[in-house]
Image: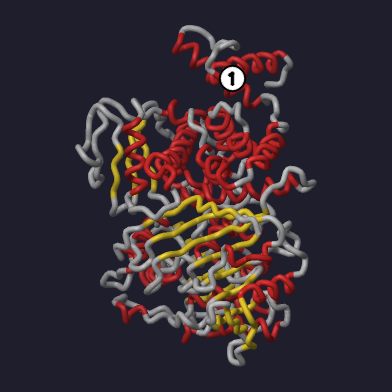
């Protein structure tokens, strides 16, 4: 197996214990923050896996039932297994004023039978005096179809794993929520650890989303506040041949691991999932039999240790259910030695709670970035003695000589997009402000050695809030409330759409003649217009600038401080130091400078170290051949930039200029005139 390791991001955290410490009501930091907003009619909680969203909902729901006059609370989860997260909790034992209780008959996730029978139970609940019901997304959809949205008036609808919802008209749950919000007779609490959708599709319609008050608890706050886990690595590995031939190159039997094998239709799959599981177990060592109580396979490794392997790929329902039940055994939750390796295909992702998991290893690219985030979340639980966690995406190396080169390159681009996004998700939140003569320091932020300086663009950091405060010259301020909300809450969602935009990532990685503004200005601007068509032009620019700045500052910070040692464990202040160093090394931290940086430059540097040079050249040639001419929409953007250039320089941009950005503006303006003459614009 010719694999090459590419840990694209390694983040080290402070282990200050803040995210696991409870207040006098038994609430952890995220739960306390969410509870402070309990009076909001529409509340969106964006918080990582294992941060306590389920219990946060319990606190909020009890207050709405007892103090805000709501009749009932209906908790909606994507699948039955997650229903157990909302079982009875003795909250008074930890200081709260009421316990959370769900009558067994109203936890429909535990009830036998299909959704059709459970819909009747929802109707019975609505007529009862009981207060809490738990059901699946599907059951809730069918119940709304049967009883109408009016039947749910004056009730709390709590939607767990909210990213399953979509503004797409074909998404029934999204359509029902839109109707409930329009009627305005319910309260909604939505919870998710990965709000963006892997396909970059909006979760809510903009007019609905604007009604939500958002509680955000970042990955940085969560992991920085752990007691035990100190470092998290996100990486991808290339291989040639069959992945099962030498899996131990990336799988360490000494680490607690969840291994997701590829879907049988994926390029990495052999087409026989059971044979792959057998080959994996054979690679690990000698099979010793099966534990009669758990159904776990016992494998004696070459080092002499017997490890326990849970096979969730098994098709035999009796065997698979036995293994699944053993993994969920509450008596074994704190037993590190209960199981060593879990092999899964479609299971052990969202809502699967195994605190000891140190390595989430995924073979083949998964369907969406949301799924990747959920899988990474399996390894980011805090547990005693667990100081390091990692996620590995094992993908076949692109070979431009093969007929399947397009598919191979697509998988590579998706893996890079996932690592770029996770890097953005894992770092502290960026707050940007325009640098003006009246700009002043913000309370609670540390501006580094020498403190705040009036004549420079300053970089402040708040350890407590897990946020940067960065001043940039030429930054446009958002005007509308929606644009302000997007700048405050949605920048990572914009970046998600951008790093998944194939023309952008292909050009950014492989086009040696790229002018960065082609993607930072034109492509990013188009993505924002398409995603938020209601925004005025100035607001589009405000959002665009912040998304590009957040992405590029993260990349430049990594390069500035870590350099060639980017994959070595570092102090948890490395990124903070890197942002400050980059800001100090440039004469002016201005938006034109940031726009002139290729956001995929650092990703290419990692890729160039990992792939065979000839393969890299062949792939670059495939991408370069796909270059397309300026479109009418792009021409409009370039024409506006050319107009601004003429205003600043008292001359139009020249088609023969030595500066490639100026040449592009001139080409774009010329194309705009041609398109207008052809009647392409109304």
Q: Residue at x 80, y 46 (%)?
A: 403
The image quadrant that residue 636 belongs to is: top right
Front residue of 682/51: it is: 51
Q: Residue at x 24, y 42 (%)?
A: 448
Evaluate whether residue 535 shows in this view.
Answer: yes
Front residue of 66/34: it is: 34
Front residue of 217/347: it is: 347
Q: Which colour scheme is used?
A: secondary structure
Taking the view exactly as shown, the residue that stands out farthest to the left is 450
Left/right of residue 314 with respect to residue 178 in the rendered view: right
Q: Residue at x 73, y 57 (%)?
A: 267
Q: Residue at x 44, y 68 (%)?
A: 381
Residue 21: x and y, percent? 30, 69
The image quadrant that residue 526 belongs to is: top right
Front residue of 133/500: it is: 500
Rendered view: 562 above or below 119 = above
Residue 607: x and y, percent? 57, 44
Judge the density around disc 1: few (<14), some (14-19), many (≥20) Cα neighbours within 10 Å: many
Residue 461: x and y, percent? 29, 45
Rendered-image quadrant of the N terminus:
bottom right
Rendered view: 420 above or below 185 = above
Number of numbered labels in the structure image: 1
Residue 528: x and y, percent? 55, 37
For numbered disc 1, what is the local secondary structure? helix
Taking the view exactly as shown, the residue that stands out farthest to the right is 403
Rendered-image quadrant of the C terminus:
top right
Evaluate whether residue 69 shows in this view.
Answer: no
Taking the view exactly as shown, the residue that stands out farthest to the top is 650
Residue named by callout 1: 664
């Amino acid at each position: 197996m010719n694999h090459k390791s590419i840990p694209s991001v390694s983040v080290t955290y402070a282990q200050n214990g803040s995210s696991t410490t409870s207040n006098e009501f038994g609430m952890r930091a995220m739960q306390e923050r969410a509870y402070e907003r309990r009076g909001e009619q529409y509340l969106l909680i964006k918080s990582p896996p294992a941060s306590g969203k389920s219990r946060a909902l319990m606190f909020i729901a009890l207050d709405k039932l007892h103090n805000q006059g709501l009749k009932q609370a209906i908790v909606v989860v994507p699948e039955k297994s997650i229903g157990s997260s909302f079982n009875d909790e003795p909250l008074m034992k930890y200081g709260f004023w009421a316990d959370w209780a769900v009558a067994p008959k109203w936890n429909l996730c535990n009830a036998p039978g299909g959704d059709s029978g459970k819909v009747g139970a929802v109707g019975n609940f609505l007529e009862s005096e009981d207060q809490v019901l738990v059901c699946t997304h599907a059951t809730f959809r069918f119940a709304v179809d049967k009883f109408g949205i009016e039947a749910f008036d004056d009730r709390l609808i709590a939607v767990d794993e909210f990213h399953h919802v979509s503004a797409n008209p074909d998404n029934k749950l999204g359509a029902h929520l839109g109707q409930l919000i329009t009627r305005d007779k319910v309260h909604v609490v939505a919870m998710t650890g990965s709000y963006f959708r892997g396909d970059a599709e909006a979760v809510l319609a903009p007019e609905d989303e604007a009604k939500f008050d958002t509680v955000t608890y970042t990955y940085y706050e969560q992991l920085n506040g752990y007691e035990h886990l100190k470092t998290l690595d996100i990486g991808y590995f290339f291989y040639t041949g069959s992945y099962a031939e030498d899996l131990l190159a990336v799988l360490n039997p000494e680490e607690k691991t969840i291994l997701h094998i590829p879907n049988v239709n994926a390029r990495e799959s052999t087409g026989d999932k059971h044979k792959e599981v057998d080959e994996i177990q054979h690679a690990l060592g000698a099979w010793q039999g099966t534990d009669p109580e758990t159904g776990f396979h016992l494998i004696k490794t070459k080092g002499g240790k017997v490890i326990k392997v849970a096979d969730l790929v098994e098709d035999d329902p009796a065997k698979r259910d036995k293994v699944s039940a053993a993994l969920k055994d509450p008596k074994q939750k704190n037993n590190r030695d209960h199981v060593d390796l879990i092999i899964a295909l479609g299971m052990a992702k969202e809502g699967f709670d195994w605190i000891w998991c140190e390595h989430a290893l995924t073979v083949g690219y998964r369907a969406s970035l949301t799924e990747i985030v959920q899988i990474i979340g399996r390894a980011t639980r805090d547990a005693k003695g667990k100081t390091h966690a990692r996620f590995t995406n094992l993908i076949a190396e692109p070979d431009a000589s093969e007929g399947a080169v397009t598919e191979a390159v697509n998988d590579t681009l998706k893996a890079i997009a996932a690592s770029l996004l996770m890097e953005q998700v894992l770092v502290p939140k960026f707050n940007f402000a325009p640098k003006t003569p009246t700009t002043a320091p913000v309370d609670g932020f540390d501006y580094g050695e020498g403190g705040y300086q009036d004549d420079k663009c300053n970089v402040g950091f708040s350890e407590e809030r897990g946020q940067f405060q960065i001043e940039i010259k030429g930054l446009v301020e958002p005007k509308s409330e929606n644009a302000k909300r997007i700048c405050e809450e949605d920048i990572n969602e914009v970046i998600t759409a951008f790093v998944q935009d194939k023309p952008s990532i292909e050009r950014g990685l492989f086009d040696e003649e790229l002018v960065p503004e082609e993607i930072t200005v034109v492509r990013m601007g188009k993505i924002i217009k398409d995603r938020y068509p209601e925004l005025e032009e100035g607001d589009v620019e405000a959002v665009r600038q912040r998304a590009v700045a957040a992405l590029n500052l993260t990349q430049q910070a990594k390069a500035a401080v870590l350099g060639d040692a980017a994959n070595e464990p570092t102090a948890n202040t490395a990124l903070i130091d890197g942002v400050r160093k980059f800001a100090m090394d440039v004469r002016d931290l201005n938006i034109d400078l940031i726009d002139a940086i290729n956001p995929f430059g650092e990703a290419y540097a990692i890729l160039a170290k990992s792939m065979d040079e000839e393969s890299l050249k062949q792939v670059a040639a495939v991408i370069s051949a796909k270059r397309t001419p300026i479109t009418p929409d792009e021409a409009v953007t370039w024409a506006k930039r050319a107009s601004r250039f003429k205003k600043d320089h008292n001359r139009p941009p020249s088609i023969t200029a030595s500066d490639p950005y100026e040449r592009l503006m001139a080409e774009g303006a010329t194309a705009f005139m041609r398109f207008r003459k052809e009647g392409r614009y109304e």
